[in-house]
Amino acid sequence: MGVPWKKEKKTVKKVNIFYTLNINARLQSFDRADIYADRIDDEIISAGIGEIDGGGSLLNTNGEIISCDVDIVLNNEDSGTFNQLIEILNKFEFPKGSRLSNDDGDNIVQLGNLEGMAVYLNGTDLPENVYKDCDVNYVIEKMNKKMNGLGSMYSYFEGNKETALYFYGKSFEQMKQAIETFTAKYPLCEKCRIEKIA
């Protein structure tokens, strides 16, 4: 009696492909999650191609965030899957200088069309009554309103000597011009400095 022929089952090995999305934005961890990571994760999971697997921030010596990373894991190395990832990322607006890199750290895709503006409020050299009577939340509200869609605040940083407010929009110059009359008059904005950050 012959031995029945048995077809050998082919085992498909799951391959995880790792990418790092470096976002050239100064975001607190919860802002990074709300604005980018959680929303991108929802899109990737819905597409069935992978998920977000953590992230982190690059800090300077005084603890201010310089940029942040989002770690992405795709569930296969198929070019179609990678193209789906790019399509998903293109739904989001990133600051200029953002990029997607592979596991070896090689830049693959440059991302970003937004410019960034940091407003550093002086926290030590103004009269005490200014800090007592003025409200940083009012500053944020008025600046967002003055920009009128040109940009908006994404995050902030509280340092020992300054509080930084981070805005992103289409044009640094337009955002700066939009708030100039306010910063010139409101006491808490005296001695503030404004820098382009993307």
Image (cartoon, grey):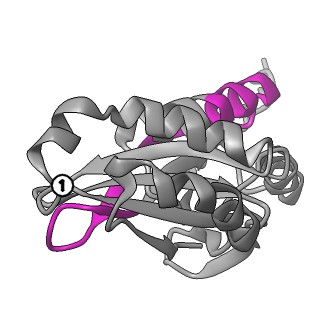
For the C terminus, give its image quadrant.
bottom right
Left or right: where 31 falls relative to 79: left
Total numbered labels: 1
Q: Residue at x 62, y 32 (%)?
A: 41
Left or right: where 46 falls relative to 102: right
Q: Residue at x 15, y 67 (%)?
A: 62
Q: Which residue, given by chain and number where applicable, does mark 1 sit on?
A: 123
Q: Position of residue 188 (x, y in %)?
A: 33, 49
For the N terminus, give its image quadrant.
top right
Q: Residue at x 89, y 52 (%)?
A: 80
Q: Position of residue 49 (x, y in %)?
A: 74, 37
Q: Give SS at disc 1.
A: loop
Q: Position of residue 110 (x, y in %)?
A: 73, 74
Query: Which residue range is magenta in the image?
Result: 39-67
In terms of image quadrants, where is residue 39? top right
Say what amino acid the circle numbered 1 marks: Gly
